[in-house]
Amino acid sequence: SLLQRAVKWRFGSDVEVVNAGVGGDNILRVAARLERDVLKRKPTHVFLFEGANSCKLRYNPTKPAPWPWSVGVEEYEKTFRDVVSRVVRSGARLTVMTCAPGDDSILKVFERQARDYATARSFFCRPAEVRRCVAIQKRVAKDLKAQVLDTHAILTRYMAAQHKTRHTEYLHVDDGVYLSEHGA
């Protein structure tokens, strides 16, 4: 809704903005519904903002690390490449928005609780995993000549500045994963 208001303010009411994002989706689900929810509408521009659910780690206290991504790394790259390729072939101008960072100061608390209480849990937006995801996103976008908006770098710098100044406008809601309205 924030983007829709900004675009309509800048370009007028002739522009239609459709949010085809679905909370909880990973790249496999995006690929499965891409034609129906996006390409069928014949968009002129597509923004692909994805990654947190694809690279989340599934912690199981009964199994030793490393824990796998919810979508395997190789499968992620293959499917992300397929999605980007399909959008580019459609003729729409694609902007890949890299995966947003999580707030590690919040995420570490949840990880410690899962370990202390030996409970299975999904760990979202762990810094090393997000960096791997972002590297794949950038590589695929470059290979397929899609534009990149490095959301990860922008928000990482902003978060670092906020932590230094103890600023009170948080980029995330209290889970450390989802962006707040301010973060959006």
Image (cartoon, rainbow, N blue to C red):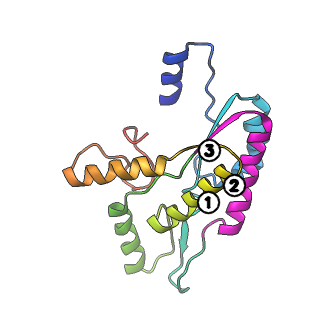
Question: What amino acid is found at the position of numbered circle 2 in the picture?
Answer: Phe
Left or right: 139 in relation to 35:
left
Around disc 1, counting alpha carbons within 10 Å, would you say few (fewer than 14), some (14 to 19), or many (20 or more)?
many
The residue wearing badge 1 is: 136
For residue 22, the mark is 3
Percent coordinates x, y for residue 128 in the rendering: 48, 68
Gap between marks 1 and 3 measured at Cα:
21 Å
The residue wearing badge 2 is: 80
Boundaries of the magenta span: 69-96
Of the pair 78 and 19, the residue shown nearer to us: 78
Majority secondary structure in the magenta region = helix
Percent coordinates x, y for residue 135 in the rendering: 57, 60
For the point 69% across and 49% down, which residue is it? 30
Around disc 2, counting alpha carbons within 10 Å, would you say few (fewer than 14), some (14 to 19), or many (20 or more)?
many
Question: First in sequence: mark 2 or mark 1?
Answer: 2
For residue 178, the mark is none
Is residue 1 visible in the rendered image? The answer is no
Q: Residue furthest left?
A: 165
